[in-house]
């Protein structure tokens, strides 16, 4: 578990560098749209049972996704979906959601 | 459209104050995207095109229905566990919040050369890019007994949520205890792979409580249950023992409407008090008419990086109408994801960039096996450059271990979020 948190911190440290100013880096925004069906547009979730992602800490989001991906954290859908994202993609998602306002 | 009418429309959309709805910004024409079909795919594409372009892409959505009625969760109406009104929404927020022009009329024809859509109301719309999200139509020509409108109103599909859902619910409510409900399942691919099996559970749940001597027969053209097979079969064997009977390889050849008999291609006859035929399906009529359904005159082949038709440049096809990649279901969740891949690609193409070379799509389908308990199937799909198609990511995806009420809560919350993400 401690190793995982360390891994998360490490991954947070190697966050993807942004593309040049001329070409906007839309990768995080677009990947985040794959989460929106359950977690709301830009991670602003409706209802009380599925966790909101907008405005959460970047390192927490990475840690949680990595725990799901590695089978350490139990769940229903998320352990299965998290395995579909690369470490780079998880980093991009966390960076995007952390930068969103918690509520619209 | 007349200028006065256009201005009125802008006023209605609350856009007169901003530049977003104007035909030009700083002298440059605003690119126009026309979307035909306001279901999960088309509405999502409309909403995301406006959000991601920050209002710089003009979007017109053509949808004849003034209501959006969700197919997901509509089996609960058949089980008596939800009202159809809870699934009925409007496209209004797309217009008022996002500046989409919503036109409640039917698209009559597509002139791909002139990049123009002819509307039933006499107007026409020019486009830079067209998105066609026509949903499915039923192949009634393969079922001689179901040619007439009267036959189709008696032997229901209820595979597009709305009037037919209510009518089928009424047939089930009127059926005496000891009766038989039979549902026929077409060969895959069809809309909503787990849908027929969820429906069987919903009807069985209703019978168990209110008409315990009644039976549910699943007459499946496929060799086995096409989705969540182990879970569904366990539920039928345990919870609905003596109620649900599953028959594979029953390919429906015809229906005797007067006798309420389903006839298989091998001459088997099954009589039912309530006969529910889910017919074989293909892309919506306009896709066929426009020559876009290039796979067996049934489904529309697209480039998955942009959702652009393989046979018609500048026309993108979304949702249940497309020829799917392996393990890619025709589902509402997936249709919503198509909408976003397409919105992103159009944003790139209009900016002179190549579309994202590594798109990711997710799918989650929840099925209610009772009024509260739910099972899911989930998957992640990404572009395989070598095989030039979408593939599921190795090791990802899966199904529930067992039905739970917790997943029932998640399923309702999923619905709330996908509705907001599509229409809100």
Image: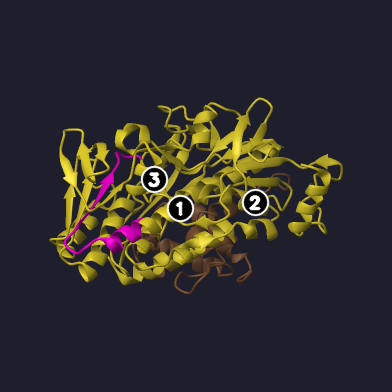
Q: Residue furthest bottom?
A: A48
Q: Of callouts 3 and 1, which one flags the residue occurring earlier in the amino acid sequence?
A: 3
Q: Which chain is brown?
A: A
Q: Which of B45 and B196 lies nearest the eye of the viewer?
A: B196
Query: What is the tally of numbered marks visible in this picture?
Result: 3
Q: Which chain is yellow?
A: B
Q: Is residue B20 visible?
A: no
Specify the subunit that label 2 lies on. A
Instruction: Please tell me the numbered disc located at residue B24.
Output: none
User: Which mark, by number, is residue B191?
Assistant: 3
Q: Is residue A7 left or right of residue B241?
A: right
Disc 2/disc 3 C-alpha distance (Å): 40 Å
Q: Secondary structure at mark 1?
A: helix
**Marker disc for residue B333:** 1
Local crowd at mark 1 within 10 Å, few (<14), some, or many (≥20)? many
Spot occupied by residue B234 in the image (x, y as percentages of width and height)? 18, 59
CA neighbours of label 3 inside 10 A, class few (<14), some (14 to 19), many (20+): many
Marks 2 and 3: same chain?
no
* Relative to B202, B391 lies left or right: right
Q: Which residues are magenta?
A: B168-189
Answer above or below: position of B17 versus B297.
Answer: below
Residue under pointer 2: A18
**Which dot, 2 or 3, sits closer to the camera?**
3
Judge depth for marks 3 and 1 and give the one in front.
Answer: 3
Residue B87: x and y in percent read 47, 62
């Amino acid at each position: 578990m401690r190793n995982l948190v360390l891994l998360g911190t490490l991954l947070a440290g190697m966050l993807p560098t942004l593309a040049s100013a001329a070409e906007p880096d839309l990768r995080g925004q677009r990947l985040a749209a794959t989460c929106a069906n359950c977690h709301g547009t830009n991670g602003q979730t409706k209802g009380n049972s599925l966790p909101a992602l907008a405005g959460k800490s970047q390192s927490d989001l990475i840690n949680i996704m990595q725990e799901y991906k590695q089978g350490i954290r139990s769940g229903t859908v998320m352990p299965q979906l998290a395995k579909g994202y690369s470490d780079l993609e998880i980093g991009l998602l966390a960076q995007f959601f952390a930068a969103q306002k918690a509520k619209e | 459209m007349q200028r006065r009418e256009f201005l009125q429309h802008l006023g209605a959309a609350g856009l007169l104050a901003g530049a977003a709805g104007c035909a030009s910004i700083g002298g440059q024409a605003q690119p126009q995207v026309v979307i035909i079909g306001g279901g999960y795919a088309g509405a999502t594409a409309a909403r995301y095109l406006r959000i991601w372009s920050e209002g710089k892409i003009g979007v017109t959505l053509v949808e004849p229905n003034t209501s959006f009625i969700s197919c997901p969760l509509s089996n609960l109406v058949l089980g008596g566990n939800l009202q159809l009104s809870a699934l009925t929404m409007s496209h209004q927020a797309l217009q008022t919040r996002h500046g989409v022009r919503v036109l409640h009329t039917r698209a009559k024809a597509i002139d791909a050369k002139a990049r123009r859509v002819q509307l039933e109301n006499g107007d026409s719309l020019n486009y830079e890019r067209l998105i066609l999200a026509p949903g499915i139509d039923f192949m009634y020509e393969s079922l001689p007994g179901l040619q007439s409108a009267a036959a189709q109103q008696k032997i229901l599909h209820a595979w597009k949520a709305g009037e037919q859902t209510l009518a089928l619910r009424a047939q089930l409510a009127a059926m005496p205890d000891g009766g038989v409900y039979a549902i026929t399942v077409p060969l895959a691919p069809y809309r909503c792979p787990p849908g027929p099996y969820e429906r069987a559970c919903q009807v069985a749940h209703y019978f168990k409580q209110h008409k315990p001597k009644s039976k549910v027969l699943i007459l499946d053209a496929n060799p086995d249950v096409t989705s969540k097979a182990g879970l569904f079969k366990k539920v039928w064997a345990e919870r609905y023992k003596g109620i649900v009977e599953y028959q594979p390889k029953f390919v429906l050849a015809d229906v005797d409407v007067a006798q309420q008999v389903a006839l298989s291609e091998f001459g088997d006859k099954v009589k039912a008090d309530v006969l529910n035929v889910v017919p074989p399906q293909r892309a919506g009529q306009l896709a066929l008419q426009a020559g876009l359904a290039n796979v067996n005159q049934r489904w529309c082949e697209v480039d998955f990086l942009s959702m652009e038709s393989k046979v018609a440049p500048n026309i993108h096809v979304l949702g249940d109408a497309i020829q799917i990649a392996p393990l890619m279901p025709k589902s509402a969740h997936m249709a919503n994801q198509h909408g976003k891949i397409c919105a992103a690609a159009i944003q790139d193409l209009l900016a002179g960039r190549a579309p994202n070379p590594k798109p990711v799509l997710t799918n989650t389908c929840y099925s209610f096996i009772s009024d509260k308990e739910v099972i899911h199937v989930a998957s992640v799909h990404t572009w395989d450059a070598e095989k030039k198609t979408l593939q599921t990511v190795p090791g990802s995806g899966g199904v529930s271990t067992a039905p739970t009420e917790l997943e029932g809560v998640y399923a309702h919350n999923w619905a709330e979020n996908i509705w907001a993400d599509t229409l809100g």
